[in-house]
Amino acid sequence: MQLKQVIIIHKARNRDSEVWAEKCARQLEQLHCRVLVGPSGPKDNPYPVFLASITQPIDLAVVLGGDGTALAAARHLAAEGIPILAVNVGGTLGFLTEPFEVFQDTEQVWERLIGDRYAVQTRMMLQANILEGSRTHPQIVGDSVLCLNEICIKPASVDRMPTTVIEMEVDGEVVDQYHGDGLIVATPTGSTCYNASANGPIIHPGMQAIAVTPICPLSLSSRPIILPPGSVVHAWPLGDYELNTKLWTDGVIGTQIWPGQRAEVQMAQCHAKFIILREKYSFYQTLREKLQWAGTRVLHSNNHHAT
């Protein structure tokens, strides 16, 4: 990997993350690398400025924070094909990030990257659009949005605890009407997040598939479903137009769904690229450590017996 131009994103209003971002910037500049540094958070979005001000391709994005910071980076950088080195600095869970221990010797990290001694994990993403008009000639309203975890369609009301009825169509065929708190359309990466909290299926991130999970359905027959990656999902609210139905992207408000409109969700053409520094990366170990899965009772590997 060349390190001629690098962007460094740190978690907004987190001092540890900011200090390490400054340290990384100084070291990379000593390697004759052009560096752009900025905060990322609910009220901070450095990516439009970064992407508009570049004079040459961005070789690497160093993202210092937690899962939310990594998700924002993926949404903005995946379409540009920029590899992301996400490190848990100031984060909470750190499901998507490299542990700080493998990053703290930063000078060695730059040597490894320049020497191509790392792995790249590609992760599937979803793209969502809001459509209106006829079924045969729909029109796209607003901009497309990308997500790494999930697209969530939920009502929002300040006056009551809202439920809704959402009708879902897959590849032009109506599948079900979900009466409950909303609907989650998740990637394999997002299957361990909100989708898992809603009792949806856990999918290995090496797969390409789409999980559709109703949120707190009022029918025992409303079950999650796993779809092939080429499926196109359409979903729209039925009745009760006094409710504000919103489309959320990785937990961030994407856009409003007005009466007569529907959401279209499908696999995005781009993938997020995450750099792996760990010599041994295990999805199952991550489940055990981060989500405290029942597998934490396993105290030995297949090659070492407990005494």
Image: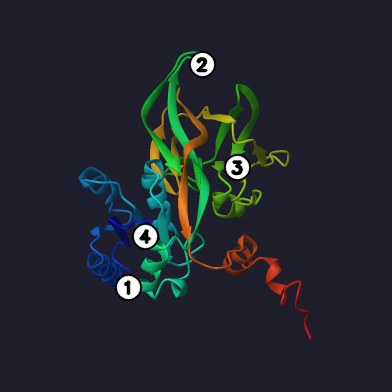
| Amino acid at circle 2 | Arg
- Nearer mark to the viewer, of 2 and 3: 3
Dot 2 or dot 3: first in sequence order is 2
| Label disc, if present, on residue 63 of the rendered structure | 4
Dot 4 or dot 2: first in sequence order is 4
Crowd around label 1: few <14 · some 14–19 · many ≥20 (10 Å): some
| x and y percentages locating residue 148 in the rendered image | 48, 47
- Tell me the distance, in whole angstroms, between the alpha carbons under discs 3 and 1: 35 Å
Q: Residue at x 42, y 71 (%)?
A: 103
Q: Which residue is mark 3?
A: 208
Residue contact at pointers 2 and 3, CB within 8 angstroms:
no
User: Residue 284, located in which quarter of the rendered image?
Assistant: bottom right
Dot 3 or dot 4: first in sequence order is 4
| Amino acid at circle 4 | Val
Dot 3 or dot 1: first in sequence order is 1
Q: Which residue is mark 2?
A: 135
